[in-house]
Image: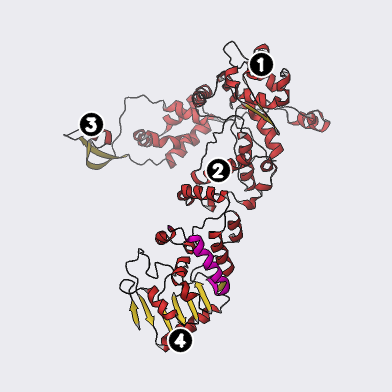
Amino acid sequence: MRIIDNTTTLLGDDLKNELSGALKFRVAAACFSIYAFDALKTELGKLKEFEFIFTTPTFTPSGAIDRIKKERREFFIPNARTEGVLSGSEFEIQLRNKMTQRAVARECANWIRKTARFKSNVTSAPMQQFGHVQRSDTGAAYMPLSGFTAVDLGYQRGDAVSSYTQVMDEPQFAQTYLNLFDQIWNDEGKLRDVTAEVLEHIESVYQENPAERVYFMILFNLFSDFLSEIDEDVLPKDRTGYLESLVWQKLFNFQRDAAVGVINKLETYNGCILADSVGLGKTFTALAVVKYYELRNKDVLVLCPKKLADNWRNYNANLTVHDINVLTVVASESYKGFVTALQKEIVENLSARPKQADAEYFDGKTLKTGDLELVLDKSLAKKLERFLIKSDYVDEDGHITAAYHEARKAEELTELPEELQAHRDAVFALIDTVFNGRTIDDMFSDGRTPKRNRLNENFQRKEFQELWRRINRKAVYQVEFDSVALVKSCIDRLERDLQVAPLQYVVTEGALSDDVTDESLRAGGAFVQGKIRSESGKSAHSRVSYDIIGSIAQNTDLTRKTVGEILAGIQPVKFGEFTRTLNSSLPMLRT
């Protein structure tokens, strides 16, 4: 038995001696590197068999989807340490900088095809890491052996504080580890053969890769820090079926990316602003988001200008098959004050939008209808401006007029110039992007105004008219009481049941501190609380006159005369009780 410290004695040198004349080399470690093979390739090349077990799940399917082949096809850049170390770990950078990686990988791949087999632990259970060299007559076990890399062999510097390995060449110890390895190696429930995956990964190192791989490598290194923020919990759920929805099929790729981004931001931050340029189809992107949440059985509220409500209903009905309700706001404050403040806020938020529909604004805009595209040059932009002026759709300052909005709503717009006819919807959608503050007034309706029910054909039916004649009457009921009996009954009830508890007060003393400062006043600590005491039985006198007869009459529908007779008939002793605590006695008097 001996100890290797990888400082005075190196594990790689010791293995070279043991592997000379060896038949088989077995390793159970976390990772494998082609540079460890390169360091021992002379000795490894003479072996009859090499068996390697990844002690943690490596090159195995993760979750419900086997992504290995897919990742290879999509120029996958491994981020898992155990898989990425195959082509060199971060501590083998000096070896990688020698630009011999492709040659080493090719030699290693040829050796694997002839000699090596790899298996991986597919369970979450921990596994011991060790190695075993089998010779014809003897053997030696190495424990622990955390990895099979140039760093673990001692040929490159790593970050470990210590790297001691114990070599057990006594037959009983070596045989124990050999039996343990063979037992694990033959357990198909714990291991899976990954030789093909390891070989494919190493082959990718020396193969000629397309230019796209360089592009994806650049992107990966630029944005790898942001990839850790991506969580499946905030990405769209494919099982909802939104990818097969009609609205999703009509989106361009950039709109689909935008919809996924919106959903991700909504799930992560509970909010998102989609700020695409004019004409990029923000409405359709939003409808795709609406469809996604509809499929998840969640409610979606759409707030839009009143004049655009029909457009939203039309698009939504055709593309998402989901009803949109109209929202009417009823505020506790006055309708005028609420709407004025809300409109002012909206105008401020929309102030960045263009306000003039003129050639300068139209110039350079792209109109898209189906597969057709048309870029408005200066000539077409000028024609569109003259069209608006001639149709009285803009005023002298280039602002959209009410005539345009009325014609737009009634679908009675003037015919466009011939060059723009093929893009009619796109042209008017572009015009709609021009901000008109006066149209804000039509965005709201007063929820407090009386509503009139519209009569349908059922109102004229004979059965309903017969019912209407029977119930369409107002009835007035008048009840007369014997005032003398009423007064006597009330007096008896009050004298019998009226129980008035004496008043109780809690008096808290407080004094202004001598060292008052501005900070203490703002913080609310300028007053110092003093004694607290309780008092009872005393009347809280007030100079304010109180109309007790009027208060009782209003709440009992009795006349003031009757109320006065009741109060006058109460015995002075009983009446004196509730005069001291008038407010607590009033509910009893009213009943």
Q: Position of residue 427 (x, y in %)?
A: 66, 24
Q: Mark 1: which amino acid?
A: Lys
Q: Quadrant of the N terminus?
A: bottom left
Dot 2 crowding, Cα within 10 Å, few <14, some 14–19, many 20+: some
Looking at the rendered structure, which numbered label has been put on residue 175?
A: 4
Marks 3 and 1 sit apart, C-alpha to C-alpha, by: 67 Å
Q: Earlier in the sequence, mark 3 or mark 1?
A: 1
Q: Residue at (52%, 55%) from the top-left corner?
A: 77
Looking at the rendered structure, which numbered label has been put on residue 261?
A: 2
Marks 2 and 4 sit apart, C-alpha to C-alpha, by: 58 Å
Front residue of 366/256: it is 366
Rendered view: 539 above or below 256: above
Q: Mark 4: which amino acid?
A: Gln
Q: Which residue is mark 3?
A: 518
Q: From where the camera sits, is residue 30 visible?
A: no
Q: Earlier in the sequence, mark 1 or mark 2?
A: 2
Q: Residue at (78%, 32%) from the top-left corner?
A: 467
Magenta extent: 97-120
| Mark 4 or mark 3, whichever is nearer to me | 4
Q: Mark 3: which amino acid?
A: Asp
Is residue 131 toward the left or the right of residue 294 in the image? left
